[in-house]
Image (cartoon, helix red, strand yellow):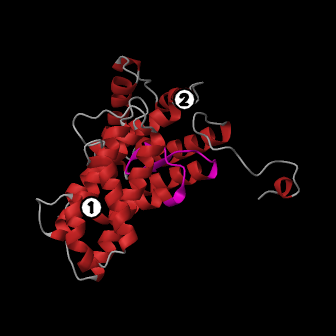
């Protein structure tokens, strides 16, 4: 805390930035974007693969993001940086998030780690430090900018996705969680109903594997595994109530039901709760000697 904040001249608090972005947040994101990404792909050492990484990004950005003519790309790298900065400081509050989101989609599909030595984990950590410091309502989770404002909630989701991985018997659970996160974080067309469905399907996938029967529902799987894992009766009841909310005749997963009153809070609650329960089941199974 600065001197002026300690003595009350300036405020040490900010409102959470959900539909806005102040100059401090924008500057912080730009600094990370330029220093940890743009400058790295722009440092050429006489190797064609480095040049390829740099050209690859700008060609894709102009073609796929701006949807402009390729010949509009500035010849000099410094001019390209200038153009990127002008876009980043657009009056549109969400433009920096759009650019960062696009960049992560590029990093995930191209060999930037090999060609430009981009450390995606360090890049994500640096962005998230700025987002947290400036009270943004968003964090980067699993390479997507996601509207999650509580650090504990972020940790539950991240732990669930990271602990499962993509190449384990639980990979189907990872797919459901990732899908739920993507449907929740889609700012243009958020799909809260299906995000909730994916969250509960992730829990169901884990429970089925522990119960040993792919034919089980979540309810029947919990009945089978509660003795093995010593699940507290109150917790068992809670997860069954959530299952009922999504799966009974009036539930969200019923084919004939359309929930028009679902919003971000509903979907976020389900994603966080289901991620937490998945983490709980995995730890309990490990302690009971059940290996995946």
> Which type of secondary structure does the marked residue at label 1 adopt?
loop
Q: Total of numbered circles in the picture?
A: 2
Residue drawn at the location 80% of the way across and 48% of the way down: 11
**Location of residue 243 in the rendering, given as x and y in whole percent from the top left corner:** 30, 54
Based on the displayed image, in which of its 4 quarters is residue 136 positioned?
top right
Q: Of 234 and 229, which appears nearest the observer?
A: 234
The residue drawn where x is 39% and y is 51% is 270
Q: Which mark is residue 165?
A: 1
Q: Position of residue 272 (x, y in %)?
A: 42, 55
Whether the residues at callouts 2 and 1 have beta carbons within 8 Å, the answer is: no
Q: Which residue is mark 2?
A: 82
Residue 139 in the image: state x and y as whole percent: 49, 48
Q: Is residue 141 above or below residue 239?
A: above
Q: Nearer the viewer, residue 215 or 271?
A: 215
Disc 2 is placed on an element classified as: helix
Q: Earlier in the sequence, mark 2 or mark 1?
A: 2
- The quadrant where residue 104 appears: top left
Relative vertical location of residue 198 with respect to residue 75 in this rendering, above or below: below
The foreground one among 115 and 64 is: 64
Q: Is residue 142 magenta?
A: yes
Q: Assess disc 2: are there few (<14), some (14-19) or many (≥20) residues with their C-alpha within 10 Å of its C-alpha.
A: few
């Amino acid at each position: 805390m600065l001197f002026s904040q300690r003595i009350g001249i300036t405020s040490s608090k900010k409102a959470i930035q959900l539909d806005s972005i102040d100059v401090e947040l924008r500057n912080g994101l730009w600094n990370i974007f330029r220093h940890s990404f743009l400058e790295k792909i722009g440092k050429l050492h006489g190797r064609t693969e480095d040049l390829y990484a740099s050209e690859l990004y700008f060609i894709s950005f102009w073609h796929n993001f701006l949807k402009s003519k390729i010949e509009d790309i500035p010849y000099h790298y410094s001019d390209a940086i200038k153009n990127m900065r002008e876009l980043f400081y657009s009056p549109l509050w969400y433009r920096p998030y759009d650019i960062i989101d696009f960049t992560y989609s590029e990093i995930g599909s191209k060999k930037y780690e090999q060609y430009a030595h981009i450390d995606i984990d360090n890049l994500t950590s640096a962005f998230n430090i700025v987002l947290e410091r400036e009270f943004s309502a968003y964090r980067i989770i699993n390479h997507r900018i996601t509207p999650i404002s509580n650090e504990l909630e972020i940790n539950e989701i991240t732990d669930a996705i990271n602990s499962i991985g993509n190449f384990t018997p639980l990979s189907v659970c990872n797919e459901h969680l990732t899908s739920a996160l993507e449907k929740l974080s889609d700012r243009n067309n958020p799909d809260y109903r299906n995000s909730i469905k994916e969250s509960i399907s992730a829990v169901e996938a884990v429970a089925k594997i522990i119960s040993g029967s792919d034919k089980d529902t979540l309810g029947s799987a919990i009945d089978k595994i509660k003795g093995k894992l010593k699940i507290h009766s109150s917790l068992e009841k809670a997860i069954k109530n959530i299952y009922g909310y999504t799966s009974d005749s009036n539930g969200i997963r019923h084919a004939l039901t359309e929930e028009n009153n679902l919003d971000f809070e509903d979907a976020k609650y389900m994603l966080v709760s289901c991620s937490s329960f998945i983490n709980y089941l995995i730890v309990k199974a490990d302690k009971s000697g059940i290996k995946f």
